[in-house]
Image (cartoon, rainbow, N blue to C red):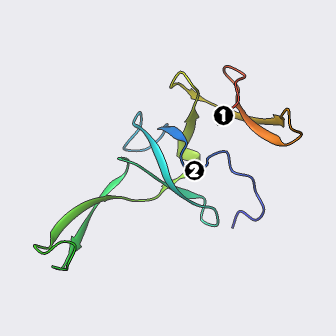
Amino acid sequence: MLGKVKLKVKKGDNVTVIAGDDKGKKGRVLEVFIDKGRVIVEGVNLASKHTKPNAKHPQGGIIKQEAAINISNLMVNDENGRPTRVGRRMGENGKLVRYAKTTGEEIK
C-alpha cells in the first residue's frame, strides 16, 4: 500500500495520539506495520479479546490488549515530551537523521 515510503515513526518512539477516541494519550511504539501504515502503541486503543483457557491464561476470559492505530493519528514527542513534526537532514556521519521541527534536536 505505502510502497517504499520512509515513515516518521519507529519502534521505541514516544508518541502522542492526535485524533480518535484516545486523543491526548501518550505511549511508546511497540510494533510498526509498514505495509498497512499502522502501529501498536503501549496503553492506547485497547480492545477486548475473548480467550479460551490455555497454559498462559488457565482461567480464560476477557483480556484487554492494544490494537493497531493509523500512523496519521500519531505525532512523535520531542525531548520535552511535546508533540512535534519530524524532519530529515544529513547527520554528522553523512547519514539521514530524524530531527524534531520544534527544537531542531535529533530524535534518537
Name the residue located 46 percent from the left edge and 59 percent from the top edge. Answer: 68
In the rendered structure, the answer to whether residue 7 lies left or right of residue 25 reads: right
Mark sitting on residue 6: none
Q: Are marks 2 and 1 in contact (CB under 8 Å)?
A: no
Q: Residues within 10 Å of mark 2 (few under 14, many from 20)?
A: some
Give the mark count: 2
| Residue 68 vertical position relative to residue 106 in the rendered view, above or below | below
Q: Quadrant of residue 65?
A: bottom left
Q: Residues within 10 Å of mark 1 (few under 14, many from 20)?
A: some
Instruction: Give the amino acid type for the residue marked by disc 2 in the picture.
Output: Ile
Q: Nearer the viewer, residue 12 or 25?
A: 12
Q: Which image quadrant: the C terminus?
A: top right
Name the residue located 86 percent from the left edge and 38 percent from the top edge. Answer: 93
| Residue 38 vertical position relative to residue 22 in the rendered view, above or below | below
Residue 36 image point, x, y percent: 59, 65
| Residue 104 vertical position relative to residue 56 in the rendered view, above or below | above
| Residue lying farthest to the left in this orientation | 59
Instruction: Give the amino acid type for the residue marked by disc 1 in the picture.
Output: Ile
Residue 44 image point, x, y percent: 38, 47
Residue 95 image point, x, y percent: 85, 43
Residue 84 image point, x, y percent: 61, 29
Q: Which residue is mark 1?
A: 107
Q: Nearer the viewer, residue 61 or 20?
A: 61
Tell me which label, 2 or 1, sits earlier in the chain.
2
Q: Secondary structure at mark 2?
A: helix
Viewer-nearest of labels 2 and 1?
1
Query: Distance between the Cα atoms at labels 2 and 1?
Result: 17 Å
Q: Secondary structure at mark 1?
A: loop
| Residue lying farthest to the right in this orientation | 94
Name the residue located 56 percent from the left edge and 51 percent from the top edge. Answer: 11
Q: Which residue is mark 2?
A: 71
Name the residue located 50 percent from the left edge and 25 percent from the top edge. Answer: 81
